[in-house]
Amino acid sequence: MARGAAVAGIGGFAGLAVAAMGGLETTSWTTVTGTDAGLRWAPALLFAIAALLDAVDGWLARRTDSVTDLGARLDVEIDGLVVLVGAAVGVLAGMLPRLFLAVASARYVFVAGLWWRNRRGHFTAELPPSHTRRALGALAMLAIFVALVPAVDPAISRAFATVVAVPFLANFGRDWLVATGHLQGDE
């Protein structure tokens, strides 16, 4: 019981970091100068904290054999929320291309589409585990972090994010075809 509570607490702190990052007013932190210039690093640090705590939470749950269905579900939800909020902050600040909003919302559109198909009685299949999906998710988080780092030129962060977004979105398209039975699920 104590191990499960500790793991849940780590995930909760990741959620708090996401909420704090989302609460930042983008126009204020991107233009801060002088003694408050450290505030410009707040989004990148909060994003890194949220992503790292989320990763540690999953690792710790597996390591202590305290993985639960609810914990796995919450892990996926925190992953999606970290990407959604981080991308929204980055786009609003002009550090990420608007295309990255499609990356941020892809999971939610996918889940809603599957829900709609199920509601209408159409076929849906579970996706098999995918190393590609995990790697692309990690790249998306890296692109967001790079964009939020104030020392990175926005032109570079936008170009990198675009390079990441294309295969990320293509993979979601492939996953949609697998989940709807139009494509075989082998990687």
Image: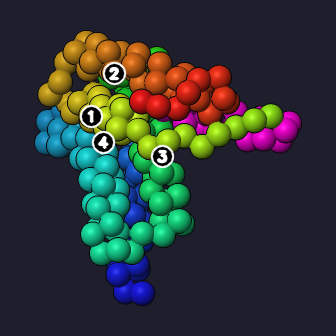
Give the SS element for disc 3: helix
Q: Is residue 93 above or below residue 7?
A: above
Query: Which of labels 4 and 1 is toward the front?
Result: 1
Of mark 2 and mark 1, the one earlier in the sequence is 1
Give the CA distance from mark 2 to mark 3.
18 Å
Q: Does the rendering let one see residue 138?
A: yes
Q: Which residue is mark 1?
A: 142
Q: Label 4 is placed on what type of residue?
A: Pro
Q: Is residue 174 above or below residue 115?
A: above
Q: Which residue is mark 2?
A: 164
Give the CA distance from mark 4 to mark 1.
13 Å
Give the SS element for disc 4: helix
Of mark 1 and mark 3, the one earlier in the sequence is 3
Q: Label 3 is placed on what type of residue?
A: Leu
Give the SS element for disc 1: helix
Q: Which residue is mark 4?
A: 43
Q: Which residue is mark 3?
A: 81
Give the CA distance from mark 2 to mark 4.
20 Å
Q: What is the span of residues highlighted in magenta in the rendered image?
A: 104-121
